[in-house]
Amino acid sequence: MDQTSLRLFENPTFSDIYAKGRPTYENKIAQHIVGKIRSDLKGKKHELMVEVACGSGQATNVLAPFFLNVLASDISESQIAQAKTLCQFDHINYQVGSAEKIDAKDASADLLVVAEAMHWFQIDSFFSEAQRVLKPDGCLAVIGYDVPKITPKTNAGLQRQLTSSFRYHMEKTINNNTSDKLVQIFREIKDNYPQTFEGIPTKQKSKEIFHQIYDNWELKDITDVMNSMMLQKNYAITKGHGILPRDTKDDCANVIDVFVSDVSEMLKESGISPECVISYEAEFEMTVITASDFFLENTNL
Ligand SMILES: C[S@@+](CC[C@H](N)C(=O)[O-])C[C@H]1O[C@@H](n2cnc3c(N)ncnc32)[C@H](O)[C@@H]1O
């Protein structure tokens, strides 16, 4: 399927919800990635990081301190506008742009990053661009994650139940979603994601799993993540310059309310009053793939 320029974030409300709900990446992930760049720095910073599909800057702000210059782009104007308002460093240059046509010079980037977005790309074009923009000793880093495990602090025994309910409601939304086209897109993404990771065309890659824990969440933080993963349900999706119509048959409109009432039931059954303030731990499993000899090995891309 042609996935060029799939745009889910044309609406500013989208980008607000996204920025509120999505995890950023811990410093140890940034250090791990930067450690994979092979150029000898002699105590200086790396020259250039390029990030594609940067969203509202979740990875950008964490990685930026290791570089003299950062070029971060996203296909969506409203994501870039949001990223600019959340920008923490003067040396980040945010631009609207696609992963399939990167606005950087040949052999200029020490690091090319894509976080939680490679599944949306037209992958061959992206890899050709990766080969073009990376320095010979530069590094491609791909980050991805799934839904988090959620544990109420007062009752760790509820982790499995609560996490399944979270997942169930997410999947129900996606499966019952609106246009068949969208369901098809999600199925393809889900089925192809492991292959996409495995398919990065270099032997010099490593895959590490980091467990990133948010220690003190409230129910609202959980529903914010849910909301950010359900953007597709609430708004139209556009592909290239065309807009796919929203379908009004959506029977998942109150899915977050149903999830919250499920959680209340679980807590009640365990003798915990849903009214009392409960803190939760959310654990994201972050997969980080780094490909260090990307340029050297792929002269035929
Ligand atoms: C799930 S978000 C990831 C955002 C951020 N990197 C993060 O880690 O949270 C996916 C992003 O990919 C962008 N996107 C989708 N297709 C793209 C493409 N072909 N080129 C560039 N950005 C794209 C979307 O606009 C969106 O901001």
Image (cartoon, rainbow, N blue to C red):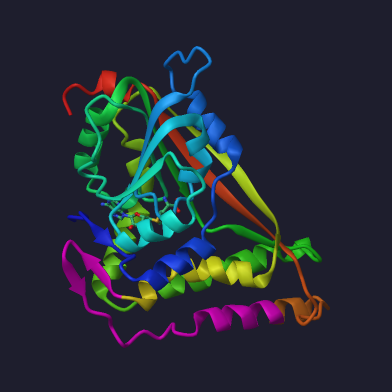
Q: Residue at x 64, y 83 (%)?
A: 261
> Where, by quadrant of the figure, is residue 185 drawn?
bottom left
Q: Is residue 111 above or below residue 59?
A: above
For the N terminus, give its image quadrant.
bottom left
Q: Is residue 141 above or below residue 115?
A: above
In-image side of 159 versus 99 (left or right): right
Q: Which residues are magenta?
A: 236-264
- Of residue 126 and residue 86, the one placed in the foreground of this image is 86
Camera sees residue 134: yes
Which quadrant of the frame does ligand 1 lie within?
A: bottom left
In-image side of 44 versus 79 (left or right): right
> Where, by quadrant of the figure, is residue 93 drawn?
top left
Camera sees residue 192: no
> Where, by quadrant of the figure, is residue 290 drawn?
top left
- Of residue 31 and residue 193, the one placed in the foreground of this image is 31
In-image side of 93 versus 85 (left or right): left
Q: Is residue 129 above or below residue 134?
A: below
Residue 238 forms part of the magenta stretch = yes
Q: In the rendering, at what x and y percent does residue 296 appear?
A: 27, 18
Q: In the rendering, at what x and y percent does residue 165 appear?
A: 59, 71
For the C terminus, give its image quadrant.
top left
In-image side of 16 versus 195 (left or right): right
Q: Is residue 160 above or below residue 210?
A: below
Q: In the rendering, at what x and y percent does residue 218 appear?
A: 69, 68
Q: Residue at x 59, y 38 (%)?
A: 27
